Image: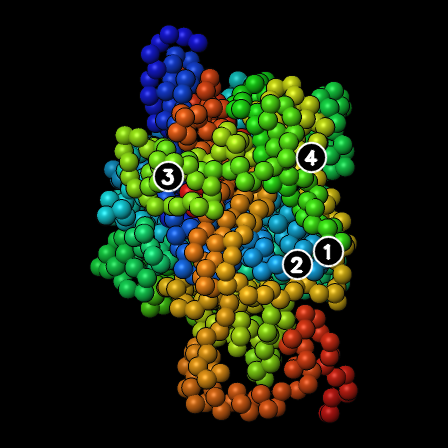
Amino acid sequence: MTFQILWLQSGGCGGCTMSLLCAESPGLLSTLRGAGISFLWHPSLSEQSGDDVQALLDSVLAGKVALDALCVEGALLRGPEGTGRFHIMGGTGRPMLTWVQALARVARHVVAVGSCAAYGGITAASPNILDACGLHYDGRYPGGALGAEFRDHTGLPVINIAGCPTHPDWVTGTLALLARGQLGATDLDPLGRPRFYADTLVHHGCTRNEFYEYKASARHPSDLGCLMENMGCIGTQAHGDCNTRLWNGGGSCTRGGYACINCTAPEFEEPGHPFETTPKIAGIPVGLPTDMPKAWYVALSSLARAATPERLARNATEDHIVVPPSSRPLRR
Amino acid sequence: MSDTPPVRRIAGPFNRIEGDLEILLDIAGDHVQEARVNATLFRGVERMLEGRAPMDALVIAPRICGICSVSQSRAAAAALAGLSQVQAPANGRIAANIILATENLADLITHFYLFFMPDFARPDYAHHRWHGAALRRFAAGRGQAVAAALRTRAELLHVMGILAGHWPHTLAIQPGGVSRGIDAEACQRLSGILASVRADLENNLFGVALETVVELADCATLHTWRQHGSASDFGLFLDIAETLELSTLGRAYDCFLTCGSWPGGRDPHNTTPLWPAGIVADGAVLPFAPQDIVEDHAFAHLRDHERVHPPAEGTTVPHLRDGTAYTWCKAPRLAGRPFETGAIARQLVRGQPLIRALVARGGGTVFSRVMARLIEMAALPLLMEQWVRQLEPGAPWYAPHGTLANGQSVGFTEAARGTLGHWLRVENGHIAGYQIIAPTTWNFSPRDAAGVPGPLERALEGAPVRPGEHTPLSVQHIVRSFDPCMACTVH
């Protein structure tokens, strides 16, 4: 028996599927096969359209076909006025909202793929005329399309593979662990995210760490310096292993020269300031690294700034290294 | 045409497209008499942009669509650049072209192998001599070619890992260039990736050098090549297309539109697109006049349906109007007419001889749309190889832009699926208006106030329906031949 997945898309961009198709070493199809996973239906990968899909959904609801995991990509749209009519599943006349609510009741596990399905995400951005929400959260608050009390047949909450987009490994890893019965409640963080990627911060492994240490900061896109002070980066607080797992063969947001915008967090879509600009009070960035007292940060950063080597100060505002590290022999 | 009263059927959900779609089909006997295309999901992204800082468009707009993400980003950056009058340095513009071409090529590969070809592996076609090969190569989710195409696509997207951080949803493309400069060694890695992608395309898809494919000049050359060429997925497609007469299926109005693509070369003062802007109407190639574009809400669940709007003055206020409206998609019209956009439009306007010959012979059809994409799949790696060689490590990649306090601007780009436009209005440092027309909004538009069907609606008229078919395969081929992106459509 394979672990059978039904994958539905609602209020979102489909980017988490597009990212999933980038899985490598091994590729997606081999990874799934190796984990004993099969798709009952997936919008990009399956043959069936139309009536065949409707027949499948009916069989699942009737309990004739086992549904091991319902994966939902995209936010659930409750509007207008609670009708769910902003998204009718094609050909069915029925809102995706109520399809998902019904299918979640018969699924062994429910998985939110991406920040939209988890918390509402970009789809729920202000003014949220869609009345969009996540499966199990409405922004940072438990609730959402399935209600705060929801638990699956094994007692788990909705598993929130948050990210905008999700890394392919986050999705395949979560599904493989579920298929093997190796993902329990303690493997999820307080926001329902799998800890195997959410217990790491984006800051970990950031190639700009030395610039960060000495507060040698970028001023413009393409500068090499730290992106925290001016460019809106909140990688020191953002949960995700983006800079150690890496994307598309070796990239990440900060390696691509732009800010981490904390896309794995609820309400990242409403930072309260322009995304690529760091808000400051009296010259000090408002958002400070997790776990760090403000007074310590101020003291350490002014010391660090005073001690910034010329090399870092100059390289920070260039798009390539203009001052290399010195090559004198190390003292033994 | 028969006199049987039509039977109404609702087809959906459609998969192997981006997003959600249903189609109302009025079927008369053995063919579709009329079709109404319903984009069943409303997104309202334009409304999210209003009131935000202009640069936030770079975060929000790409998230309209996970498959055209860079295209949205590029159009937003172009609109912002227009507002601030900034000009990207040569490296910035070339890198942005490489990033966009990477997305477009990945999308073309995804469309051919994952979305379009799997339909020919269906048991409905088991009696055809090519079915065994189609099943082996293209079966949805398991064909050999599907797995191979995913490998090629993933490797191609390593270009994004180097130049753009990741894909989708990069912030690398800025109004003044790109956020990442790379060194000579990284340029060499880009060349290596492109060499590997080229090898995959030549070995699996085409069976010949990419240069040979882009030089296919007319139907006779294509026929000769097919007789003598080695076995390839392209050859298999040609066999399938011939037996199923795909060149007679899904003709719309033969009106095509492109805003032009790949601006500039090495000259920072020359931003002329390499593939020019233009329209094709009544058999003639004419200039593209964006001021002649309007949007019509007559059959969309939106307010302001009493009159048409130029996009700069457009609105997006949802309002269910059952009985009249049948979709969330607006109806864009150029000089009052529906237009089709996509690879076929780009290659026609550019004057690619084979595509011109195919359209002259049979119009825009399932066959000629897919052929235009195949031509682009061969042409894009060749362009990208040149662009990588033109990058100049050490020279600037980015130029700072001025203030974005007030003004109006339009950003155009060609996504894989066709012409994408962003109309931006900024007042007092905030976005006051943001209207988008995406490629599939053109292609899958509903009827307008005059009752004129959109291009897909028109293309479906006359589609054959076999006895017992609920979601006719001909309809599915025609729908997928447009490579629709519904997520963009209902932005």
The secondary element bearing badge 1 is classed as: loop
| Dots 2, 1 in contact, CB < 8 A | yes
- In the picture of the structure, the residue carrying the numbered disc 2 is B87
Would residue B396 appear left or right of A20 to someone viewing this image?
right
Q: Earlier in the sequence, mark 3 or mark 1?
A: 1
- In the picture of the structure, the residue carrying the numbered disc 1 is B268
| Dots 1, 4 in contact, CB < 8 A | no
Residue A34 in the image, given as x and y percentages of width and height: 50, 49
Q: Quadrant of the N terminus of chain B?
A: top left
Q: Which mark is residue B50?
A: none
| Distance between mark 2 and mark 1 Cα atoms | 8 Å
| Res. B121 in view | no
Q: Do marks 3 and 2 share a chain?
A: yes
Q: Earlier in the sequence, mark 1 or mark 4?
A: 1
Nearer mark to the viewer, of 1 and 4: 1
Would residue B46 appear left or right of B397 to someone viewing this image?
left
Nearer mark to the viewer, of 3 and 2: 2
What's the residue at 57%, 82% (across, down)? A215
Q: Do marks 4 and 2 share a chain?
A: yes
Nearer mark to the viewer, of 3 and 1: 1
- In the picture of the structure, the residue carrying the numbered disc 3 is B328
Please report, as a chain letter, where disc 4 is located: B
| Res. B384 in view | yes
| Dots 4, 3 in contact, CB < 8 A | no
| Dots 3, 2 in contact, CB < 8 A | no
Above or below, B91 against A85 in this view is below
| Distance between mark 4 and mark 3 Cα atoms | 33 Å
Please report, as a chain letter, where disc 1 is located: B
Q: Which mark is residue B350?
A: 4
| Distance between mark 1 and mark 4 Cα atoms | 22 Å
